[in-house]
Amino acid sequence: MLYALILAGGKGTRLYPLSREENPKQFLKLINNKSFLRSTVDRIKPLVPKENIFVVTNEDYLAKVYSELPDIKKENIFVEPANKETALLSI
């Protein structure tokens, strides 16, 4: 059985000026009129059952994630208490 974990808590600094803290890149609709977050979920749904799709975000974006992903159970959406740059790689 496959599981997916989508990190969607970024602050919107990498696609500046389109991406801002109040509307970071995961919510931008640059391709096919879907947000990057929605497009990611749509791409993995043929491989991973929706009950096995999990999203990590921060409190500021929780309502947006719920809005973008109404088909993902709320129990599968985790909120980080503070931004810790969990996906940041150091070289």
Image (cartoon, rainbow, N blue to C red):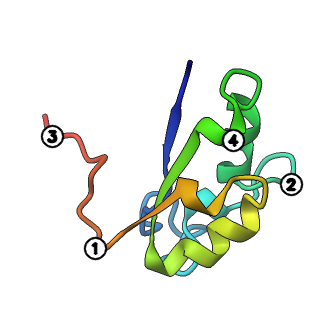
* Disc 2 versus disc 4: nearer the observer: 4
Q: Residues within 10 Å of mark 3 (few under 14, many from 20)?
A: few
Judge left or right: residue 27 versus residue 60. right
Residue at left offset 67%, top offset 56%: 73
Mark 3 and mark 4: span between their CA atoms?
Answer: 27 Å
- Which of the two labelled residues, at mark 3 and mark 2, occupies the earlier sequence position? 2
The residue to which callout 3 is attached is 90
- Which of the two labelled residues, at mark 2 and mark 4, occupies the earlier sequence position? 2
Judge left or right: residue 33 versus residue 18. right
- Which of the two labelled residues, at mark 3 and mark 4, occupies the earlier sequence position? 4
Mark 3 and mark 1: span between their CA atoms?
Answer: 20 Å
* Disc 3 versus disc 1: nearer the observer: 1
Across and down, in percent, residue 20 comes to 52, 75
Residue at left offset 67%, top offset 50%: 36
Helix or strand or loop: what does disc 2 sit on? loop
The residue to which callout 1 is attached is 82
Q: Residues within 10 Å of mark 1 (few under 14, many from 20)?
A: few
Mark 1 and mark 2: span between their CA atoms?
Answer: 30 Å
The residue to which callout 4 is attached is 41
- Which of the two labelled residues, at mark 4 and mark 1, occupies the earlier sequence position? 4
Residue at left offset 76%, top offset 38%: 42
Helix or strand or loop: what does disc 4 sit on? helix
Q: Is residue 22 above or below residue 84?
A: below
Instruction: Report the quarter where the N terminus lies.
Output: top right
- Which of the two labelled residues, at mark 1 and mark 2, occupies the earlier sequence position? 2
Which residue is situated farthest in the right direction here? Answer: 32
The residue to which callout 2 is attached is 33
